[in-house]
Image (cartoon, coloured by chain):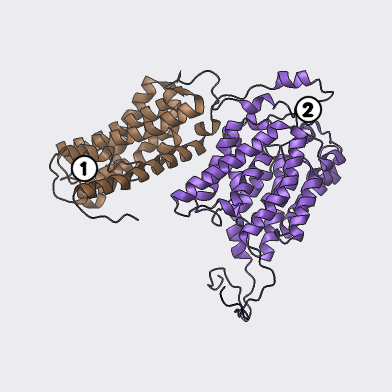
């Protein structure tokens, strides 16, 4: 500004203004420790996986933003989050070409079909994951052991599958590792089918098998809390997701602890933590009202546990969040607060509520 | 749309070609979506469905055109349905006789040809107002356009979903099938992708025609 005197501004006189770019940068920062732990745990494969999903997502974003006449939207960073999150939800040895498909579909179908950042109905990363879950159901349920020896020098064989080919089998590779106990299943599957609970501390610390970035509940919790403390994330969403999960898991566990998982297991296993803190809290796809986010979060928690306990799938976080995303405009509409000075409830479009 | 005119149309190549491209029942008019999405999982199903629909379409349009002076206006829809249902029954029995396997694969969608909007639309908008020979050519074009659209979906879905074409493997050993393409969502994805292609090509073509006719256009 040329005028260096007293800057006169109209209201609102906010002390701190968080821009979209700042928030996105904060979320990327919070995701980096999780990504680092994931690379430490699973090695080179996860590094390649994250680079692929982020790179392809960014490339898709760049091309589609140009096609839509919105210029370069890469610098707002939202697509980097999409790419990172997508990579973190995939199995460590997921073939890179399938990860690229997921990233491309996620950004194109989940985001740009609706008009780009701010218009996406659902979380783009989860749209991409849902697509590959339906397209390649076998590859996305193939898990590899954590802390495999030599993981930093050579990737998991299936990672470098040639494009459009079936994943290279990893059974021989796992046999060659000579691990003591490896069943090829995640703690969730073991609980579901053999009713054996992995010690919660292992789940909490993240020394178990699973999707690349979902293993360490502790790390996700720390990073999520930091984001919430920075006001870059609505803490009510993860809190109500977890509350919903516990609420529905507790009675079952009390009835039969041998058959049903404990609430602590429910919270720390699978993708619930990552989903609650980093995906359900997507600012665009979650409701805008204070009461709405609580309903939305509870719904995700309850639905996740119901899918886990009674559904055909072992893990239900992804579909729970996607369904809740689809419902969130209605939730916002139902939970409009009373407009100050009026008797009835207001609506987002300024029309009286019906 | 010239065919909304009540005057008899003169037979031109366009009478036939409209159904293939300009007024393609699937890609332009978005009619008959039910079989388009449901039975295009494999090329063979798509082909059979397309031919069955074409037969019913041509047959019923001819009969409607033939009887157009005798069908009372007040009960015309019911009359069309009876005529269409007659041909659907023929096709139904024919497919059942030819291949029980195909009949099972197509399921209820053969009987549902009765309520296919493409056919009823042809009867109402064209056959009931036009002479026999133009009706034949036009409905044949529409039927082939419908079959082509079904094939366009069926081939993509079969190649991606199973790596085969008409049951013959066409992709190298070890190809990873995209399971979703053989499932119902695949129908939506592939239809959406084709519509994207056609909607992208359409305006380009229109603009080119405009330029060719000497009009000044403004490019954004």
| Residue B64 against residue B182 in the figure, above or below | below
Q: Position of residue B136 (x, y in %)?
A: 20, 35
Residue A109 in sight here: no
Question: Is B200 displayed left or right of B175 in the figure?
Answer: left
Residue B142 disc label = none
Q: Secondary structure at mark 1?
A: helix
Q: Nearer the viewer, residue A169 or B102?
A: A169
Which chain is brown in the rendering? B
Q: Chain of mark 1?
A: B
Return the mark for residue A148.
Answer: 2
Residue at 55% from the left image edge and 20% from the top image edge: B174
* Colour purple, chain: A
Q: Position of residue A30 (x, y in %)?
A: 73, 51
Q: Residue at x 34, y 24 (%)?
A: B94
Q: Is residue A258 above or below residue A109?
A: above
Q: What kind of element bears circle 2?
A: loop
Q: Dot 1 corresponds to which residue? A: B127
């Amino acid at each position: 500004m040329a005028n260096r005197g007293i800057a006169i501004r109209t209201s609102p006189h906010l002390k701190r203004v968080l821009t979209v770019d700042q928030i996105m940068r904060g979320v990327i920062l919070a995701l980096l420790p999780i990504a680092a732990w994931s690379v430490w745990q699973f090695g080179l494969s996860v590094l390649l996986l994250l680079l692929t999903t982020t790179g392809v997502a960014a490339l898709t974003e760049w091309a589609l933003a140009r096609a839509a006449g919105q210029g370069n939207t890469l610098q707002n960073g939202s697509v980097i989050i999409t790419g990172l999150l997508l990579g973190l939800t995939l199995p460590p040895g997921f073939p890179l070409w399938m990860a690229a498909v997921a990233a491309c579909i996620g950004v194109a179908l989940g985001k740009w079909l609706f008009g780009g950042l701010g218009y996406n109905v659902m979380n783009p990363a989860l749209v991409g994951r849902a697509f590959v879950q339906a397209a390649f159901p076998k590859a996305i349920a193939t898990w590899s052991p954590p802390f495999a020896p030599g993981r930093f020098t050579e990737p998991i064989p299936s990672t470098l599958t040639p494009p459009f080919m079936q994943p290279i089998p990893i059974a021989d590779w796992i046999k060659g590792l000579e691990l003591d106990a490896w069943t090829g299943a995640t703690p969730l599957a073991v609980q579901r089918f053999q009713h054996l609970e992995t010690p919660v501390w292992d789940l909490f610390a993240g020394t178990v098998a699973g999707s690349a970035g979902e293993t360490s509940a502790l790390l996700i919790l720390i990073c999520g809390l930091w984001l919430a403390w920075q006001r870059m994330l609505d803490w009510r969403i993860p809190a109500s997701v977890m509350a919903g999960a516990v609420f529905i898991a507790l009675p079952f566990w009390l009835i039969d602890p041998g058959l049903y998982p404990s609430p602590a297991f429910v919270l720390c296993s699978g993708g619930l933590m990552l989903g609650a803190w980093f995906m359900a809290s997507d600012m665009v796809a979650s409701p805008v009202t204070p009461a709405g986010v609580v309903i939305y979060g509870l719904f995700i928690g309850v639905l996740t546990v119901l899918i886990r306990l009674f559904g055909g799938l072992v893990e239900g976080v992804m579909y729970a969040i996607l369904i809740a995303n689809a419902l969130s405009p209605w939730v916002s509409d139902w939970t409009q607060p009373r407009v100050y000075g009026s008797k009835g409830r207001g609506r987002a479009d300024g029309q009286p509520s019906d | 749309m010239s065919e909304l005119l009540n005057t008899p149309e003169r037979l031109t190549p366009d009478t036939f070609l409209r159904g293939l491209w300009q007024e393609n029942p699937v890609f332009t008019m978005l009619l008959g979506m039910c079989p388009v999405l449901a039975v295009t999982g494999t090329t063979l199903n798509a082909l059979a469905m397309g031919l069955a629909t074409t037969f019913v379409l041509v047959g019923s349009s001819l009969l409607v055109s033939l009887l157009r002076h005798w069908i009372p206006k007040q009960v015309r829809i019911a009359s069309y349905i009876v005529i269409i249902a007659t041909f659907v029954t023929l096709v139904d029995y024919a497919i059942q006789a030819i291949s029980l396997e195909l009949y099972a694969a197509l399921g209820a969608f053969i009987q549902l040809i009765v309520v296919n909007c493409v056919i009823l639309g042809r009867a109402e908008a064209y056959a009931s107002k036009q002479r026999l020979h133009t009706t034949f050519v036009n409905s044949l074009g529409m039927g082939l356009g419908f079959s082509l659209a079904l094939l366009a979906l069926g081939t993509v879905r079969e190649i991606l979903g199973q790596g085969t074409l008409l049951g013959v493997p066409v992709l190298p050993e070890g190809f990873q099938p995209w399971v979703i393409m053989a499932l119902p969502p695949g129908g939506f994805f592939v239809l959406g992708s084709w519509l994207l292609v056609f909607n992208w090509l359409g305006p380009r073509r229109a603009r080119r025609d405009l330029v060719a006719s000497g009009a000044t256009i403004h490019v954004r």
